[in-house]
C-alpha cells in the first residue's frame, strides 16, 4: 500500500491560483451587486430634495392621488418609480418596491 504525500509547493500554488481566480470573478461581478447601478455616477453622492409643498403639488396633479418614489435604483425616471423594480425583482429574486406617498 502506497501513501501519497501532498507536495507543499503544489498546495501553495493551488491555493494562490484559487485566490486569484476568486478575486477576478468577484471584480467582474461587482457591478451586479451595487445598490446604484447607474444613476448619476459622476456625483460622489446622489441626493434628491423636494419640499413638502412640492410633494403635495405632485400628489394633487397625479391621476392616482399619490407620489411613488423609487427604492430599487433601477428607474429611468429616478427618484420616481417607473415600475422597473418588477423586472429587477424577477431577474434577481429580490423584493424591492417603491415608497408610495398619498394624502390619506
Ligand atoms: S422602479 Fe424602483 S421602486 Fe419602482
Image: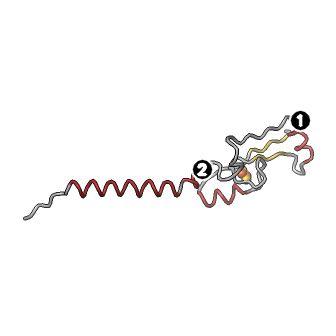
The span from disc 1 to disc 2 (Cα, nearest Å) is 32 Å
Above or below 60: residue 7: below
- 52 lies left or right of 81: right
**Residue appearing at x 75%, y 56% in the figure:** 83
Disc 2 residue: CB within 8 Å of ligand 1:
no
**Residue appearing at x 38%, y 53% in the figure:** 19
**Residue appearing at x 68%, y 53% in the figure:** 38
- 62 lies left or right of 21: right
The reply to whether dot 1 and dot 2 touch (C-beta < 8 Å) is no
- 33 lies left or right of 49: left
Q: Which color scheme is applied?
A: secondary structure
Labelled disc at residue 94:
none
Image location (x, y in percent) of residue 89: 64, 56
Image location (x, y in percent) of residue 32: 58, 55
**Residue appearing at x 90%, y 51% in the figure:** 63
Q: Nearer the viewer, residue 99 or 104?
A: 99
What secondary structure is marked by label 1? helix
Quadrant housing residue 18: bottom left
Q: Which of 91 and 64 is in front in this view?
A: 91
- 19 lies left or right of 52: left
Image location (x, y in percent) of residue 73: 69, 50
Quadrant holding the C terminus: top right
Labelled disc at residue 53:
1
Image location (x, y in percent) of residue 72: 68, 50
Quadrant housing residue 11: bottom left
Q: Name the residue under label 2.
A: 34
Q: Residue furthest bottom?
A: 1
Amino acid at each position: 500500500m502506497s501513501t501519497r504525500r501532498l507536495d507543499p509547493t503544489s498546495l501553495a500554488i493551488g491555493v494562490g491560483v484559487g485566490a486569484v481566480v476568486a478575486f477576478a470573478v468577484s471584480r467582474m461581478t461587482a457591478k451586479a451587486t451595487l445598490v446604484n447601478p447607474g444613476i448619476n455616477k459622476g456625483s460622489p453622492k446622489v441626493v434628491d430634495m423636494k419640499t413638502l409643498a412640492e410633494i403635495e403639488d405632485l400628489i394633487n396633479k397625479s391621476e392616482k392621488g399619490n407620489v411613488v418614489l423609487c427604492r430599487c435604483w433601477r428607474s429611468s425616471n429616478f427618484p420616481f418609480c417607473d415600475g422597473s423594480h418588477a423586472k429587477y425583482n424577477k431577474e434577481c429574486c429580490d423584493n424591492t418596491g417603491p415608497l408610495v406617498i398619498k394624502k390619506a
